Image (cartoon, helix red, strand yellow):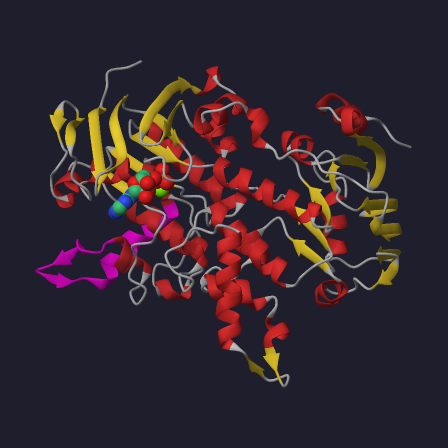
């Protein structure tokens, strides 16, 4: 590797006697993207905060270009071009985009704030980054993704030597993420040293040169991304073999919980028959865009169908609207929790309580607030959602905890059937395992579970039976020992008349 530019040399930090970062040594050259990977609590953020000067170190040294930069005020580190974008926003909501970008260093003329220059400079930066944001807009009028982009623009308006990003894509859409990746690649080409924290394996493989895995504050290993695969990284992160990652398969009875017959939306999907039996988790596999997503959405009432029959415990039910589907006993977890699953700026309490509000209405008007709080508290405990307080905005939580909030909301409606689309997208491995256990627990309790996922290992690890969709129809069904990645791919890619 090229000469080290940024070096962590035996750096340690503990909080009240509990070790958060334990003798970590890393070195990263210029023009390089290093991913940092690790379960929640592995020490990633603490490491970064010692770099920026937000935290001091207990021992060890951090050097930039051979000179020590640890234990200095954050302003001194910033002066050296070390800039971090955290998960939590550091914007002033009442100020404009332009004012936020240049906060603390307004371009002035004779000491006066020159508003025109400010807006023009901000416009230049936003244009260079290809960000369609009005520099004069007030930050509190922007959505979460736009605020994140302003946060990024603010960082990039500086002369950078090291850029740190702590899960920058959590609030971004796919298009925005693509834009961000272009920007990061440009920075790498111009010699910036980049530390990139993300739970999304695909991003790490797309973007990073090398990846460092941390566990319990310790450095597990650093590898070229070309020399590792997903499973290997997961094993390093969780420190055990994958077998134990998925819960044991369930005990099934012949009793039918859920059935779909001749269910069809023209040009999208046409499902002849699908049955879920008691205790069973059924998966839907297929190549991208074979109707599986629309099928799941239709079961949740979020997609119009032409015809079809849906039965729960033998009784025909209505899924013509989301409200009807819920009333019928179908809980639907959409694949895009940021757009559909959650009100991001609202509190965890509101999000969890929202779905089942009617259950706690007295005289159809007043909501029983005490019942609401205790319901939410119980949901947070049973799902092990990690948060500071139920009144914390959902946008603050990690992907895994956001997904648990979505689950808590759906479970509050006491569904008989749960339809989940991409249930662990953007979720770290630790939380993944918890979510799998939770889903298995629901199936064991007799809730029919249907999972649509583009991650084959997830389907194979979790499901008792997998149906494969191609061209909108179910083309194959695999159970137990017959389930394998190869069998699924063979069915999914088979030509169908
Ligand atoms: P990660 O970013 O990998 O999720 P963190 O660096 O946030 O991990 O946390 C590492 C450990 O340090 C955790 O056990 C966490 O609880 C603890 N920790 C982090 N910040 C603080 C703090 N300010 N006070 C006390 N403990 C902290
Ligand atoms: Mg963190």
How many marks overall?
0
Residue 419 vertical position relative to residue 11 in the rendered view, above or below: below
Left or right: 374 as drawn, with respect to 468: left
* Residue 185 picture location, percent across and down: 40, 31
- Is the N terminus in the top left, top right, bottom left or bottom right quadrant? top left
Q: Find out whether residue 51 is within the magenta segment.
A: no
Q: Nearer the viewer, residue 76 or 410?
A: 410
Q: Nearer the viewer, residue 90 or 250?
A: 250
Left or right: 108 as drawn, with respect to 171: left
Name the residue rendered at 48%, 33% in the picture: 203
Name the residue rendered at 16%, 44% in the picture: 74
* Residue 2 picture location, percent across and down: 28, 15
Asked whether residue 264 appears in the rendered view, the answer is: yes
Left or right: 27 as drawn, with respect to 56: right
* Residue 235 picture location, percent across and down: 49, 24
* Residue 376 picture location, percent across and down: 51, 64
């Amino acid at each position: 590797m090229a000469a080290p530019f940024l070096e962590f040399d035996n750096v340690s930090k503990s909080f009240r006697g509990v070790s958060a970062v334990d003798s970590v040594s890393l070195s990263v050259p210029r023009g390089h993207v290093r991913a940092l990977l690790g379960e929640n609590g592995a020490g990633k953020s603490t490491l970064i905060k010692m770099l920026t000067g937000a935290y001091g170190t207990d021992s060890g040294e951090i050097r930039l270009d051979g000179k020590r930069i640890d234990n200095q005020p954050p302003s001194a580190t910033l002066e050296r071009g070390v800039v971090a974008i955290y998960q939590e926003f550091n914007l002033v909501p009442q100020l404009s985009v332009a004012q936020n970008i240049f906060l603390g260093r307004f371009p002035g003329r004779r000491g006066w704030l020159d508003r025109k220059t400010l807006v023009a400079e901000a416009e230049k930066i936003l244009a260079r980054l290809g960000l369609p944001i009005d520099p004069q807009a007030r930050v509190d009028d922007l959505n979460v993704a736009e605020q994140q982009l302003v946060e990024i623009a603010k960082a990039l308006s500086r002369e950078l030597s090291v850029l740190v990003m702590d899960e920058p894509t959590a609030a971004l859409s796919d298009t925005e993420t693509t834009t961000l990746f272009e920007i990061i690649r440009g920075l790498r080409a111009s010699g910036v040293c980049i530390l990139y924290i993300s739970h999304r394996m695909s991003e790490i493989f797309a973007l990073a040169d090398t990846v460092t895995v941390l566990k319990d504050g310790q450095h597990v290993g650093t590898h070229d991304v070309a020399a590792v695969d997903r499973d290997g990284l997961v094993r390093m992160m969780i420190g055990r073999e994958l077998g134990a990652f998925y819960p044991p398969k369930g005990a099934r009875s012949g009793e039918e919980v859920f059935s779909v017959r001749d269910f069809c939306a023209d040009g999208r999907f046409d499902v002849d028959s699908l049955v879920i039996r008691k205790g069973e988790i059924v998966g839907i596999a297929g190549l991208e865009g074979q109707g599986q997503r629309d099928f799941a959405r239709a079961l949740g009432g979020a997609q119009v169908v032409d015809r079809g029959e849906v039965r729960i415990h033998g009784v025909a039910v209505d899924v013509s609207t989301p409200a009807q589907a819920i009333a019928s006993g179908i809980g639907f977890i959409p694949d895009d929790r940021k757009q559909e699953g959650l009100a991001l700026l609202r509190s965890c309490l509101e999000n969890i309580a929202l779905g089942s509000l009617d259950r706690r209405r007295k005289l159809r008007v007043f909501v029983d607030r005490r019942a609401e709080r205790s319901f939410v508290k119980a949901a947070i405990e049973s799902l092990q959602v990690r948060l500071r307080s139920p009144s914390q905005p959902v946008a603050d939580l990690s992907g895994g905890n956001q997904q648990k909030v979505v689950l808590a909301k759906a479970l509050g409606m006491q569904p008989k059937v749960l339809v989940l689309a991409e249930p662990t997208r953007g979720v770290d491995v630790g939380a993944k395992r918890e979510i799998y256990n939770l889903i298995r627990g629901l199936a064991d309790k007799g809730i029919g579970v249907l999972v649509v996922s583009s991650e084959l290992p997830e389907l194979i690890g979790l499901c008792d039976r997998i149906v494969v969709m191609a061209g909108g129809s179910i083309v194959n069904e695999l159970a137990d020992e017959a389930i394998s990645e190869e069998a699924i791919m063979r069915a999914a890619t088979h030509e169908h008349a």
